[in-house]
Image (cartoon, grey):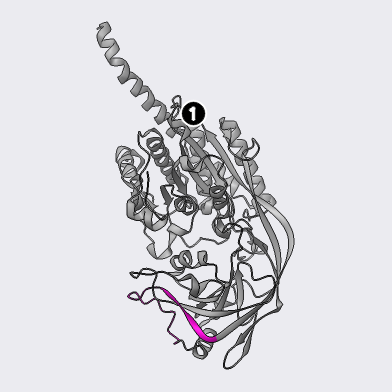
């Protein structure tokens, strides 16, 4: 049967749509388990020494990814026409033996740094400084929970170490306490492994918090803290997370603390983000961007000071799942989209960041120094630990905050052949929404989805090795994100926040 001309013309749009679908299918099919296995083997090899921030091995991984982006034909999205954006770091030496914390109260005493109290993170004041003390009480989830700046700013603030810590930190740290003291009944087996017991080298991000240093984060055991609380008029159970009481910082009466903690500058360094851009096809929408992110750093070896612990002869925390898996997913997605005959309408940004393990540093720097207009970034699809656990599910954190969750459900329903079911947060007690790079974009008003297959016993251990990645599952997962990214990039409308979520996370009223 031959086509009549009118019928032929009517059929052309259908044929074009079919060709686009074929193009998308072939792009997704380019994401294979074999490719993922090969790339995980490169990024999480022993020779990369766990990709600490900063390190020559992290720079080597960044160079490899930049070379892949160049090979795919992506446009450089970093500094000065390159694929790399570098952010500054400072390397400091901490000496606990010459450091003390003096306490003025009814019974003055001195805490020995490295024994009674440990410096586990952050930067202490550069000179000996005296400040009042306060205790955070209540629950961050209780109605009316907020912290008054007058009760926190410039003070030494005691906080319970536990599941609510991340939610409290979000409210506490912007108020710039002088120091934060984590209190818990640490058993000897944990206390002896915490950092801050011996002289060490630490790394600081001078760009964090608008250039302000992260305050000193100290740790003390419950018995030590309770002795001080008693002198300051606080009960020993003050730190309990009373679910029905709003969060508050209450002063320790007539207690002041003098921090004399010695840290000195050793070096000025930097670390890389890698950014590649695939320009969109629509004359108007190509000025908007869909962001695909993962962090390429991990915690290195014990000498990096990021918490890696040797086990027998193995002293390398390879980070195959955390986050070699997410990094490889971003590289696979970049290649898949670059192969499409018909490019998406919006432009796509593929970015692997560093410093995530130290405090979401690289993504925070990019969010403050974006290499494309941040107001034009319509969504961030972030992948962190996506190569393990159940073969048929992926947890999607933040899906309840925007209509991206609805879009994802539609995409998953249309591609049941992938055998990946998006589910909600399976570990709400872990505060995962605050613990990966998407959070820095969400705070800036970018709708996000955070994909993870979840925690496991190899998390931050030398046993997080390439051979344990379920590459077949990760390939199916990455294809799902491919189709999701395609749907967002081609949608006529930008993703939209839910108003209450926008108010809670970003502040103010959403305009998108």
Q: Mark 1 falls on what kind of element?
A: loop
Residue bearing mark 1:
339
Instruction: Describe residue 334's horizontal placement relative to residue 397 as left or right.
Output: right
Q: Main secondary structure of the magenta part?
A: loop
Q: Position of residue 22 (x, y in %)?
A: 38, 26
Placement of the C terminus among the 4 image quadrants: top left
Can residue 216 be seen at all in this image of the molecule?
Answer: yes
Quarter holding the N terminus is top left
- Indicate whether 459 appears above or below 451: below
Magenta span: 235-254
Q: Is residue 18 above or below residue 396?
A: above
- Counting every numbered tag in the picture gives 1
Q: Quadrant of residue 494?
A: top left
Which picture quadrant has residue 27? top left
Residue occupying image coordinates x 45% and y 68%? 168
Residue drawn at the location 63% of the way across and 58% of the way down: 205
How far across and how far down the image is residue 111, in percent? 63, 84
Q: Is residue 248 magenta?
A: yes
Report x, y in % for residue 462.
58, 60
In reply to whether residue 135 is colored magenta, the answer given is no
User: Which quadrant of the structure image shows residue 505?
Assistant: bottom left
Mark 1 packing: few (<14 Cα in 10 Å), some, or many (20+)?
A: some
């Amino acid at each position: 049967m031959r086509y009549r001309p009118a019928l032929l013309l009517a059929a052309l749009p259908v044929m074009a749509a079919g060709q686009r679908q074929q193009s998308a299918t072939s792009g997704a099919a380019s994401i294979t388990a074999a490719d993922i296995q090969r790339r995980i083997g490169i990024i999480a090899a022993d020779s990369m020494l766990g990709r600490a921030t900063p390190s020559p091995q992290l720079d080597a991984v960044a160079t490899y990814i930049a070379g892949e982006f160049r090979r795919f034909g992506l446009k450089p999205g970093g500094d000065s026409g390159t694929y790399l954006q570098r952010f500054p770091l400072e390397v400091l030496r901490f000496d606990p033996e010459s450091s003390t914390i003096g306490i003025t109260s009814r019974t003055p005493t001195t805490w020995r740094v490295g024994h009674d109290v440990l410096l586990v993170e952050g930067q202490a004041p550069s000179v000996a400084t005296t400040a009042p003390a306060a205790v955070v009480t209540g629950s961050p989830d209780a109605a009316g929970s907020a912290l008054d700046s007058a009760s926190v700013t410039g003070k030494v603030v005691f906080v319970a170490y536990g599941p609510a810590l991340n939610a409290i930190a979000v409210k506490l740290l912007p108020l710039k306490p002088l120091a934060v003291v984590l209190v818990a009944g640490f058993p000897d087996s944990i206390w002896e492994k915490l950092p801050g017991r011996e002289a060490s080298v630490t790394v600081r991000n001078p760009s964090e918090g608008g250039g302000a240093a992260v305050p000193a984060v100290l740790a003390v055991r419950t018995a030590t803290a309770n002795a001080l609380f008693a002198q300051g008029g606080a009960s020993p159970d003050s730190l309990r997370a009373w679910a029905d009481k709003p969060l508050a910082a209450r002063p320790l009466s007539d207690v002041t603390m003098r921090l004399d903690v010695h840290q000195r500058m050793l070096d000025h360094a930097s670390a890389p983000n890698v950014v590649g851009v695939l320009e969109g096809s629509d004359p108007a929408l190509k000025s908007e961007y869909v962001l695909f992110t993962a962090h390429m750093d991990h915690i290195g070896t014990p000498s990096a000071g990021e918490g890696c612990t040797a086990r027998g002869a193995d002293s390398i925390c390879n980070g195959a799942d955390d986050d070699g898996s997410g990094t490889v997913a971003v590289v696979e997605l970049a290649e898949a989209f670059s192969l499409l005959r018909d490019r998406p309408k919006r432009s796509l940004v593929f970015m692997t960041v560093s410093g995530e393990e130290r405090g979401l540093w690289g993504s925070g720097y990019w969010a403050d120094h974006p290499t494309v207009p941040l107001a034009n970034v319509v969504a961030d699809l972030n992948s962190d630990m996506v190569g393990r656990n159940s073969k048929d599910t992926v947890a999607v954190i933040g899906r309840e905050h925007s209509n991206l969750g609805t879009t994802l459900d539609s995409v998953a329903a249309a591609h049941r052949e992938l055998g990946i079911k998006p589910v909600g947060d399976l570990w709400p007690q872990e505060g995962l929404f605050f613990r990966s790079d998407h959070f820095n974009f969400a705070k800036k008003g970018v709708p996000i989805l955070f994909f993870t297959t979840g925690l496991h016993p190899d998390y931050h251990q030398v046993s997080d090795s390439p051979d344990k990645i379920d590459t077949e599952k990760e390939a199916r997962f990455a294809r799902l994100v491919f189709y999701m990214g395609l749907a967002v990039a081609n949608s006529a409308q930008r993703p939209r926040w839910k108003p209450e979520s926008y108010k809670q996370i970003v502040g103010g009223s959403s305009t998108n």
